[in-house]
Image: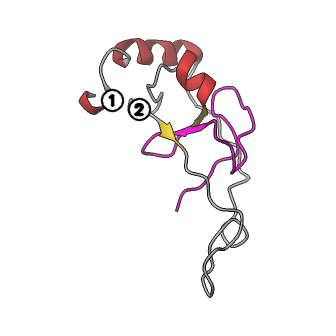
Amino acid sequence: MLELRPNCELCDRDLPPQSGDARICSYECTYCAHCVETVLHNVCPTCGGGFAPRPIRPARNHREGKRLGLAHHPASTTRVTSPYTAEDIAAHVARLRDTAPRDR
């Protein structure tokens, strides 16, 4: 199950569980759409992969007898920030941004 991190790891913008602006890589690194498009150019600073919109976990359980939804599986409240410097991220992105994620 996804952790649903609460913030963009680059600009620290809040990304609540229902946010349509959250983007994740396959390792669940979490960034806002603005940072992914304008700074990262669809290159994860950690793994080099691309990003996809983070799914939205339903707020409530829609299945009788099941423990689903945010009420039973809340989003993380632990804020995460990228350990990389702006210079390191820029160099990493420059190396990979012209290669499609499937070919990285």
Q: Is residue 24 depicted above or below 96 in this figure?
A: below
Give percent across and percent down for residue 79. Answer: 71, 44
* Residue 94 drawn above or below residue 56: above
The quarter in which the C terminus is drawn is top left
Label 1: state its secondary structure.
Answer: helix
Q: Residue furthest left?
A: 103
Tell me the kind of residue under disc 1. Answer: Pro
Residue 1 image offset from top left, x and y in percent:
52, 63
Q: Which residues are magenta?
A: 1-29
Q: Which mark is residue 50?
A: 2
The residue pinned by badge 1 equals 101
Q: Is residue 42 one of those drawn in magenta?
A: no
* Proximity of marks 1 and 2: CB atoms separated by less than 8 Å: yes
Q: Position of residue 27 (x, y in %)?
A: 45, 45
- Residue drawn 62% across the image and 52% down it: 4
| Front position in the image: 77 or 37 | 37
The crowding category of the residue bearing disc 2, from other C-alpha atoms within 10 Å (few below 14, some 14 to 19, many at least 20), is many
The secondary structure making up most of the magenta span is loop
Asked if residue 88 lies left or right of residue 86, the reply is left
Report if residue 6 is visible in the image: yes
Going from the N terminus, do you reach mark 1 or mark 2 first?
A: 2
The single residue placed furthest to the bottom in the displayed view is 65
